[in-house]
Image (spheres, helix red, strand yellow):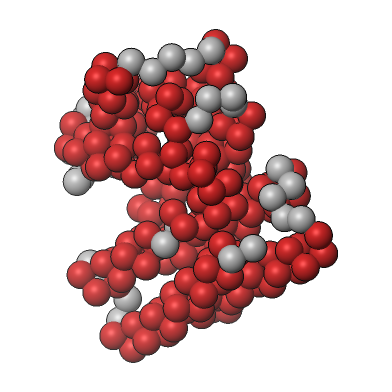
């Protein structure tokens, strides 16, 4: 869609907020002030995670970052949901969950070749890991709300938009770009808004661990599009990428089976 990562973040969040505003205007959901603030904070955390991920995309490419961010997010949200929210019950569930996490990491290592990671790329992965905390908060805070589903979508999107706006206005002047207001990225934000709304519904129905694990299956499409269409990897790397993604998917479904 164009633009630097600040402009992409701002445009995407604007699209999400626009989508959520339309949903709220149509259905007029009621929500308490306490839940409103929790969803709003969830949105703020998303802007942190999204900013880090988009920056890393620009630095290392989608096909390189997507499997890694999937692993970071899945591991963090699984442990938060399994241990903090007690979605894993008993020794067997915990052992199966930890085994699934190991399989997910193995899939990432094979698809991305982490054993060959260059020293100059270490900072990129550190930034990704630290900002992934934002995604953990994005998924975790709705757990404490009494209302669930689309009722929290508008305040969450408002938090996304305000958080992204602050990041944009603080940093966009430092890097030039061809999309000053991120207008071209609003379309992708509207598309993401549809996905984000269904994810909120899934959180209420399936719990944090299962909802997030299933949502991360988008890594297959994103990685293969970047690998084949954007040609971010050589043909010789496609087989290992596919093999790693298959293993990663197996780990995700193993997680969901708990």
Front residue of 190/35: it is 35
Residue that appears at 31% across and 37% down: 193
> Residue 248's x, y, as percent?
51, 72
Residue that appears at 47% across and 58% down: 214
- The quadrant of the picture occupied by the C terminus is bottom right
> Residue 190's x, y, as percent?
24, 36
Residue that appears at 44% across and 48% down: 53
Depicted 25 relative to depicted 204: above or below: above
Q: In the orientation shown, which residue stands out farthest toward the right?
A: 91
Quadrant of the image occupied by residue 95: bottom right
Depicted 133 relative to depicted 57: above or below: above
**Is residue 27 shown to the viewer in this render?**
yes
Residue that appears at 44% across and 75% down: 245
Quadrant of the image occupied by residue 246: bottom left
Depicted 255 relative to depicted 12: above or below: below
Q: In the orientation shown, which residue stands out farthest toward the top?
A: 33
**Is residue 113 shown to the viewer in this render?**
no
Depicted 190 relative to depicted 38: above or below: below
Horizontal side, residue 145 vs residue 53: left or right: right
> Residue 216's x, y, as percent?
45, 57
> Residue 49's x, y, as percent?
50, 41
Horizontal side, residue 69 vs residue 11: left or right: right
How many marks are shown on the rendered structure?
0
Horizontal side, residue 62 vs residue 82: left or right: left
């Amino acid at each position: 869609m164009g633009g630097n990562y600040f402009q992409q973040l701002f445009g995407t969040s604007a699209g999400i907020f626009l989508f959520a505003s339309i949903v709220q205007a149509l259905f007029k959901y009621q929500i308490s002030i306490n839940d409103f603030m929790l969803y709003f904070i969830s949105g703020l955390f998303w802007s942190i995670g999204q900013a880090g991920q988009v920056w890393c995309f620009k630095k290392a490419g989608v096909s390189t970052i997507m499997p890694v961010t999937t692993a970071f997010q899945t591991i963090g949200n699984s442990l938060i949901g399994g241990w903090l929210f007690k979605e894993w019950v008993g020794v067997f569930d915990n052992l199966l969950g930890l085994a699934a996490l190991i399989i997910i990491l193995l899939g990432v290592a094979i698809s991305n070749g982490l054993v060959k990671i260059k020293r100059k790329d270490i900072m990129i992965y550190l930034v990704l890991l630290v900002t992934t905390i934002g995604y953990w908060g994005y998924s975790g805070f709705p757990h404490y709300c009494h209302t669930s589903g689309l009722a929290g979508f508008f305040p969450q999107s408002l938090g996304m938009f305000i958080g992204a706006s602050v990041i944009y206005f603080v940093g966009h002047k430092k890097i030039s770009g061809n999309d000053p207001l991120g207008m071209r990225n609003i379309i992708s934000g509207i598309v993401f808004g549809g996905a984000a709304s269904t994810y909120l519904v899934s959180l209420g129905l399936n719990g944090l661990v299962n909802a997030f694990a299933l949502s991360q299956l988008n890594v297959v499409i994103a990685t293969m599009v970047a690998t084949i269409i954007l040609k971010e990897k050589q043909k010789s790397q496609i087989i290992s990428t596919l093999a790693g993604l298959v293993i990663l998917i197996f780990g995700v479904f193993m997680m969901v089976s708990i």
